[in-house]
Image: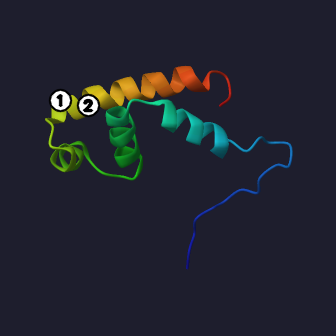
Amino acid sequence: MDLTYIPERDEHEPDLKPKLDSVLHQLNPAFRTVLILYAEGYEYAEIAQMTKVSIGTVRSRLHYARKAAQELLGNDI
């Protein structure tokens, strides 16, 4: 039995997918990669191994990716 709750989408609520896609495409590719992998549930060590960089670099890139994405999104979320 699946107990995942998915609320109904309000018809007046904007669809954020196009905006999020736009933000991702505007990010530096290294930042985008780390952000997507982290969002998919990978841990820092796994991302470091997959991208062949140190865990510190993963943390740094994730920090700057989040900051850039937040600036690009502005008040849209």
Where is residue 3? Give x, y as percent.
Answer: 57, 69
Q: Which residue lies under the disc numbered 1?
A: 56
Query: Eyeballing the image, is 43 above or below 60?
Result: below
Secondary structure state at the residue bearing disc 2: helix
**Quadrant showing the N terminus:** bottom right
What colour-coding does the image apply?
rainbow
Q: Nearer the viewer, residue 70 or 52?
A: 52
Amino acid bearing label 1? Gly
Q: Nearer the viewer, residue 6 or 56?
A: 56
Tell me whether circle 1 and circle 2 mark residues in contact (CB < 8 Å).
Answer: yes
Callout 1 crowding tier (Cα within 10 Å): few <14, some 14–19, many ≥20:
few
Q: Which residue lies under the disc numbered 2?
A: 59
Secondary structure state at the residue bearing disc 1: helix
Determine the residue positioned at 35% across, 33% down: 31
Horizontally, residue 59 falls left or right of residue 13, namely left
Location of residue 65 by image quarter: top left
Determine the residue positioned at 65% across, 43% down: 18
Residue at the right extreme of this rendering: 12
Where is residue 58? Give x, y as percent.
Answer: 24, 34
Q: How many marks overall? A: 2
Horizontally, residue 7 falls left or right of residue 71, namely right
Horizontally, residue 23 falls left or right of residue 51, namely right
Amino acid bearing label 2? Arg
Q: From mark 1 to mark 2, how far is it between C-alphas?
A: 5 Å
Determine the residue positioned at 43% across, 28% down: 66
Determine the residue positioned at 18% across, 45% down: 45
Query: Eyeballing the image, is 8 above or below 32?
Result: below
Q: Which mark is residue 43?
A: none
**Quadrant showing the C terminus:** top right
Horizontally, residue 58 falls left or right of residue 67, namely left
Where is residue 54? Give x, y as percent.
Answer: 13, 35
